[in-house]
């Protein structure tokens, strides 16, 4: 079993003027991703992923909403080190993602909604041809930089 966790935190600071109104916006955003992998018996491997994206600025006056991602995959090694079959589903719990952008200014507020297809199903079959034998050989020729005067 293998567990990994990755993330970041960022601070955005934007200052500017629009329609004679000064904007001085500060946002703290974050991203968090986790993955859990299991090596099962007889060449099987399973994986589960979860990710979290915070609300993010998209302009001086606007932000987009936060969202959660998830995914599961299953792999089977069919020919020792050569052939692998894989299947994966991304975001099985959410068919759509509502991307909401909010823009605020002096005397107005705008909200737009874009519904995006979020779920995905993937299958793949990968075959590895050949193998690397020994070290990579270096060329006998080389470049000498001896034309620099002292």
Image (tube, grey):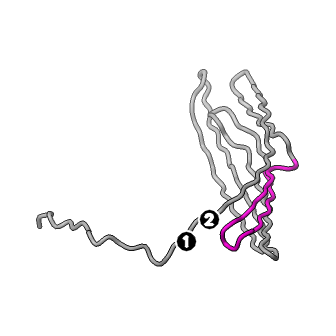
The residue that label 2 is drawn on is: 128
> Rounded to the nearest whole Å, what is the CA distance between mark 1 and mark 2?
8 Å
- Indicate yes or no whether the magenta region holds residue 72: yes
Residue at 81% across, 45% down:
119
Q: Quadrant of residue 107?
A: top right
Q: Position of residue 117 (x, y in %)?
A: 79, 38
Residue 50 lies left or right of residue 147; in this view the side is right
Q: Is residue 59 above or below residue 9?
A: above
Q: Position of residue 93 (x, y in %)?
A: 88, 49
Q: Is residue 13 above or below residue 140?
A: above
The residue that label 1 is drawn on is: 131
Single out the residue that lies furthest toward the right. 93
Cβ–Cβ below 8 Å for labels 1 and 2?
Answer: yes
Q: Position of residue 128 (x, y in %)?
A: 62, 65
Q: Camera-side residue: 22 or 78?
A: 78
Q: Is residue 62 above or below residue 40?
A: above
Q: Is residue 105 above or below residue 13?
A: above
Q: Which residues are magenta?
A: 68-93
Is label 2 in a helix, a strand or a loop?
loop
Q: Camera-side residue: 9 or 99?
A: 99
Single out the residue that lies furthest toward the left. 149
Is label 1 in a helix, a strand or a loop?
loop
């Amino acid at each position: 079993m293998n567990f990994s966790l990755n993330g970041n935190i960022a601070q955005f600071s934007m200052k500017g003027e629009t329609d004679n109104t000064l904007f001085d916006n500060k946002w703290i955003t974050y991203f968090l991703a986790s993955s859990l992998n299991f090596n099962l018996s007889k060449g099987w491997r399973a994986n589960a992923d979860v990710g979290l994206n915070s609300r993010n600025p998209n302009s001086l006056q606007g932000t987009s909403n936060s969202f959660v991602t998830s995914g599961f995959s299953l792999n089977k090694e069919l020919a020792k080190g050569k052939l692998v079959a894989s299947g994966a589903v991304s975001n099985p719990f959410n068919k759509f993602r509502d991307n909401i952008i909010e823009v605020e200014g002096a005397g107005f507020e705008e909200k737009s909604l874009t519904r995006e297809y979020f779920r995905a199903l993937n299958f793949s079959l990968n075959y590895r041809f050949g193998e690397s034998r020994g070290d990579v050989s270096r060329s006998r020729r080389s470049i000498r930089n001896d034309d620099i005067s002292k």
